[in-house]
Amino acid sequence: MESADELVKTTPLHRRLAMGIGRAGRLLLDQLYPPVCLSCEAPTGMADTLCAKCFAALRPITAPLCPVLGLPFEVALGPDALSAEAIADPPPFERARAALVYNDLAGTLVSRLKYGDRPELARFCARLMAGAGHELWADRPILVPVPLHPARLQRAALQSVGGTGAAAGKAHRARV
Ligand SMILES: [Zn+2]
């Protein structure tokens, strides 16, 4: 692994300058438009995130869960235990994952992302999705953003789908 000094020596000057300018730009923007919670707009220490109160209201889906549908279990039933829903009505796919239990806050975030023209939500949602689906990522994954139904396809919807896909792809170095 490279040390910080070696990394500085191997990074070209123009790249270091661009990184410095980008950092300075972000600091200036943070002064002009201080970062706020994506949900309640309370001040936060960094952009594209939630305040502690809103973050606590999210219910991330973690193990134990159904290996097919990704539904959370209350207790661990073993690695191959399927949910009643997956047994009763097997889906046409092998595995699916969701980042959060769909509650009021998760619904609000999704609605704002899809219909509210809030592309900054894409980075936050992509981080959640990348974490929840880490076991599904192949060595060189290809992400395919799926827009809404063509009849409802609008510019904002395309931006949110594409933005989330791009952000998730960046997080996992995947092609989108
Ligand atoms: Zn908040």
Image (spheres, rainbow, N blue to C red):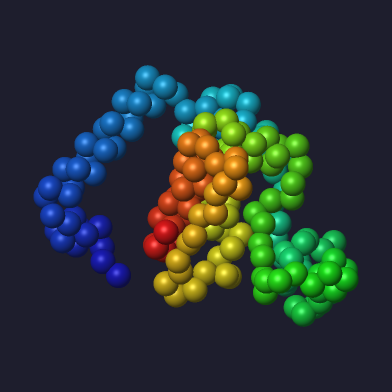
35 or 6, nearer to the observer: 35
Residue nearer the viewer, 39 or 97:
97
Q: In which quarter of the image is residue 112?
A: top right
Give the image location of residue 44, x and y in percent.
Answer: 53, 30
Task: Name which residue lies at 71% across and 71% down.
Answer: 92
From the viewer's perspective, is 4 left or right of 160?
left
> In the image, residue 98 lies at what x, y percent?
67, 57
Q: Can residue 118 be seen in this view?
A: yes
Q: Quadrant of residue 11?
A: bottom left
On screen, residue 77 above or below 99: below
Residue 124 visible in the picture: no
Quadrant placement of the N terminus = bottom left
Q: In this view, does 76 lie above or below 8?
A: below
Between 26 and 99, the one lying in front of the other is 99
Q: Considering the image in quadrants, where does the C terminus appear?
A: bottom left
Q: Residue furthest top?
A: 32
Residue 153, x across and y down, in percent: 55, 41
Q: Which residue is drawn at 70% across and 60% down?
A: 62
Identify which residue is drawn at 26% across, 63% down: 3
Of residues 171 and 161, which is closer to you in this image?
A: 161
All told, the count of numbered labels is 0
